[in-house]
Image (cartoon, grey):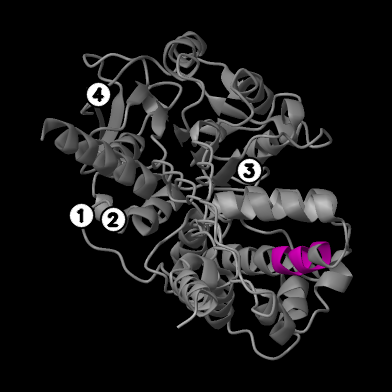
Amino acid sequence: MTAAYHLLLRAAVLAVTTATTTPAAAREPRPPAAASATGAPRSAPPSARSRRPAPARPAARAPQPARAPQRAHAPPAAPEAPEAPPVAPEPEPAAWRALVVGGGPRPPMNQVAIEGHVRYFQSLLPATVERRVLFADGSRGTRSVQFLDGLRMRYRAPRLPRIDGATTRRGFDAIWRKFVRARPADPLLLYFAGHGSPDPRRDLDNNVFDLWGGGGLSVRDLAARMEELPDDTPVVLVMAQCFSGAFANLLFEGGRPDGELVERDVVGFFAATRDRPASGCTPEINEADYTDFSSYFFAALSGVDRLGNRVVGADFDQNRFVGMNEAFAYALLHQATGDVPVATSDVFLRRFVNKPDHETMATPYARVLSWSSPAERAALEGLSDALGLRGEHRLRAAYDREFGPGAGRSDVEDVTSAHRLRFIRLAKSVVLARALRQSGDRALIERFERLRAAEARNPLAEAKAASQARQDTRRRAAR
């Protein structure tokens, strides 16, 4: 064979070899980056990306023999696929802290049920959750707890697993400074169990929590304390006292209902509207008879009632997780008292959506159900059944029965009236939420959805997950 033929054969073999050894990554499309729990693509933190080595330069190619001009050149080798960036680790669950403010202003108003609420709440917190407890005068020796012994009213010393101070202004400020402000970035769960009063100047947007020995902690007092925390510190409030709904104004700067929205995620669930009393302050010692708001709320949220019994039926969306919004709906549906509870989202909607009641109550019931979340739908259906409401005009029927001609003055202890008010208020919130979402105000809609997402969290479950994560980390470190 001629030398030219050998040269052409060698060039053909080289071309085939080069084509068949092209990396697979160059021939197939790369899969998309893994998605995080929120649906956004995961990416490496800036520091990790900046440390990634630059791709190696390709080695210089050796001179190739000349090819015959009539033969096509072999395709160049594809460059190696770049190294995939490291995946950012999932954030650890939030390490919640808890502050409990409990007790009445003096022994005759410091009923044993209030002590029971504080004990039950403490029992639901994982042991690793840091907490501080203020109760009555802060002493274990004072006979400050009132209870009913048969027909006789008696007093005894507190029986709580811990007491860190008195429920006074000085005691609250000291705990806030040493415990809350000392770790300002950690999420905060606040639980108030005691008595509340209307503002002395009858400003129902600035009601107070009654403190031991007299005086009170007002909405604006608490707003001023919360302003000392970073804007990204989440705060959850559960308040069981009378007139507690005024504290939903902590959504706004200065605790004023006409103030700008605060930046932080602050959500709250309250036993009563700003103008109504609440149940749960009884001297009866049998906890099986307690039917207050926070008992139902925490039973649904934790899955265990105050007697240690398992609670089911609060997972309305069937996702094996009970959020605070579902626990709130559970309490609305099951609490057989004169309480009319309030959530922060209710106050948000009434501030920013201007829709007259006569228009809201004219909404057909089927539409209201179609706009409702699973928890809202369950509460509306259950309350409607309990009230004997039927037909598409049941919102109007309930409203007229409660506020129409001949309705008369409402009795705050009337359970049927309270159920009717819960039905009316919940239906109104659903209709207002629908109106907001159709308003086109993107900034306000996004802020509302963020609030609703925060209300759907479960601090108890998150605290438990954080505790488990720390234990797992310690076990891995010990290996």
Q: Residue 162, which numbered label?
A: 4
In the rendered structure, which segment of residues is drawn in magenta?
Answer: 429-436
> Given contact means CB atoms under 8 Å apart, are the residues at marks 1 and 2 in contact?
yes
Q: Residues within 10 Å of mark 1 (few under 14, many from 20)?
A: few
Count of numbered marks: 4
Q: Residue at x 66, y 19 (%)?
A: 224
How far apart marks 1 and 2 lie (CA) works out to 5 Å
Residue 452: quadrant of the picture: bottom right
Residue 245: quadrant of the picture: top right
Pinpoint residue 357: horizontal percent, then vertical percent. 84, 66
Q: Amino acid at mark 2?
A: Asp
Q: Which residue is mark 2?
A: 305
Mark in front: 3 vs 4:
4
| Membership of 432 in magenta stretch | yes
How far apart marks 2 and 4 lie (CA) works out to 21 Å
Q: Which residue is mark 1?
A: 308
Disc with the residue nearer the chain's start (2 vs 3): 3
Determine the secondary structure under disc 3: helix
- From the viewer's perspective, is 174 left or right of 251? left
Q: Amino acid at mark 4?
A: Arg
Q: Which residue is mark 3?
A: 245
Q: Residue at x 38, y 27 (%)?
A: 108
Determine the secondary structure under disc 2: loop
